[in-house]
Image: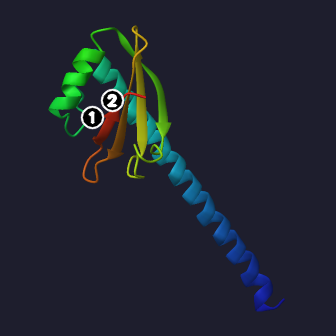
Amino acid sequence: MNKSQIISPLIAIGLFAVICALIVARNERQGFLQRRAAAVGHDLIMTTNSLNLVLIGPHLQERLNQFLANTGRVARIALGDEPPPIGNGEAAVRIFFDNQKAERLALRLRPDSDSAQLHVLGFWSP
């Protein structure tokens, strides 16, 4: 048996292991973002604030107070950012809310590099 017959399968197994590890890591990150976004959505509906957010600006706080005066709910959580002109590729997750008046509100969020919290990049009414 020559060296190439031993090395080639080892390289193939190594590449397979690396690819599997990358897929698992990506899925873990996506799951984390979805769970964190769901927690933020729940917190915002209950108290119009969330410890899972780095900061809620005054404009968003005012909009949440108006929007959630009519019982709201999380309609959808989506990974990734909106296409331009709303998004610019920075958001990792979006939360969509709706309320009893059939109004919609959406938030663009990205993870904080130093903590498990999320930054609000923007909000809009779809």
Give amino acid for label 1: Asn
Give amino acid for label 2: Val
| Mark-to-mark CA distance, 2 and 1 | 6 Å
Q: Residue drawn 64% across and 71% down?
A: 14
Q: Which mark is residue 81?
A: none
- Image height check: is 14 above or below 38? below
Q: Are marks 2 and 1 in contact (CB under 8 Å)?
A: yes
Asked where in the image residue 13 lies, by quadrant, the reply is: bottom right
Q: Residue drawn 19% across and 37% down?
A: 55
- Image height check: is 38 above or below 1? above
Residue placed under numbered mark 2 in the picture: 40
Which percent across, then down, holds residue 85? 41, 46
- Image height check: is 53 above or below 103? below
Secondary structure of the residue carrying numbered label 2: helix
Of 123 and 11, nearer the camera is: 123
Secondary structure of the residue carrying numbered label 1: loop
Q: Residue drawn 28% across and 49% down?
A: 112
Residue 48 visible from this viewpoint = no
Question: Is residue 68 left or right of 26 when viewed as pictured?
Answer: left
As drawn, which residue projects farthest toward the bottom?
2
As drawn, which residue projects farthest toward the front?
85
For label 1, the crowd category at 10 Å Cα-Cα, with few meaning under 14, some 14 to 19 and many 20 or more, is some
Which percent across, then down, holds residue 123? 32, 34
Image coloring type: rainbow
Asked where in the image residue 6 lies, by quadrant, the reply is: bottom right
Question: Is residue 99 left or right of 27 when viewed as pictured?
Answer: left
Question: Which numbered disc, 2 or 1, marks the residue that appears first in the sequence?
Answer: 2
Residue placed under numbered mark 1 in the picture: 52
